[in-house]
Image (cartoon, grey):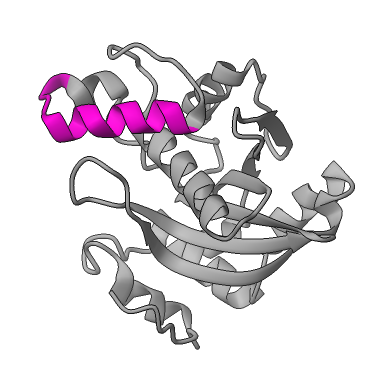
Amino acid sequence: MTDILLPATSAEEWRQYLADPVKQWETGFSAKTLAYCWQEAGGFPQSVTAVFRSTGKPFAELEPLLILPEHKVSLPGGRAPSQNDIWVLARMQKELMSIAVEGKVDEPFADTVNDWLREGSAGKEERFAFLTKTLGITIPRTSPLRYQLLHRTASAILEAERFRADHAMLLIHSFSPRHAWFEDFAAFLDLWGIQAELNKVHSARLPSGCALHFAWVHGEERYLSK
């Protein structure tokens, strides 16, 4: 994969980077909805900016420097990377933040940790150990937590390390009118003793010293018809 990047001039150009450009590009689903929302905004969408501003400083001053659709982050244990719907390198004051954006409508967060580990392999064992160490958490192998939340958050942390950023964030940008699967997000944040709320930034501190943030932002529903 080349490190040379070309700027997108339309949301339709995002489609080519999907794992399945045919099945995943449907009106009313997350990939297409997210692409049109962010491409039209040309930066943080209004829904995201509103949450950052309501959080106050320094989040109110957060600005994107680089936005990469379908950004892949390699993880130990197998060849499949964590493919971020969007990855953002952002700046607030003099500090950098790595943001892994996961778009959602009604799609679930896929397998639980228990289901993912059920058909075990040396690669999965290696990756599970790496993820829990990176996140600074301990969870049982039979955990009902969603595996996708673990590796997506880890990808934000890894890119923070790569770009020497002091902050990492998992941002769920959900366009679901009923906030589908928010309970999975809330269960994940409970690992850090955080009671999740909609449209609010929550923060924790990793053993490495990196500040870890989480947010569930309700997106602009008008993009569901794009």
Residue 161 x, y percent position in the rendering: 54, 51
User: Most extreme residue toward the right, as rendered?
Assistant: 57
Residue, x 60% and y 27% (percent of image)? 207
Q: Main secondary structure of the magenta part?
A: helix
Q: Is residue 197 above or below residue 88?
A: above
Q: Between residues 14 and 81, which one lies in front from this camera angle?
A: 81
Q: Quadrant of residue 25?
A: bottom left
Residue, x 61% and y 45% (percent of image)? 169
Residue, x 64% and y 15% (percent of image)? 193
Provide the residue span drawn in magenta. Answer: 118-134
Q: Please give the count of numbered marks on the rendered protein.
A: 0
Q: On the rendered structure, is 28 left or right of 122? A: right
Q: Is residue 136 above or below residue 94?
A: above
- Tell me the quadrant of the picture where the N terminus can be found: bottom left
Indicate yes or no whether the magenta region holds residue 127.
Answer: yes
Residue 192 showing in the rendered view: yes
Residue 196 x, y percent position in the rendering: 65, 25
Indicate yes or no whether the magenta region holds residue 175.
Answer: no
Q: Quadrant of residue 131?
A: top left
Residue, x 34% and y 11% (percent of image)? 140
Residue 191 x, y percent position in the rendering: 54, 18
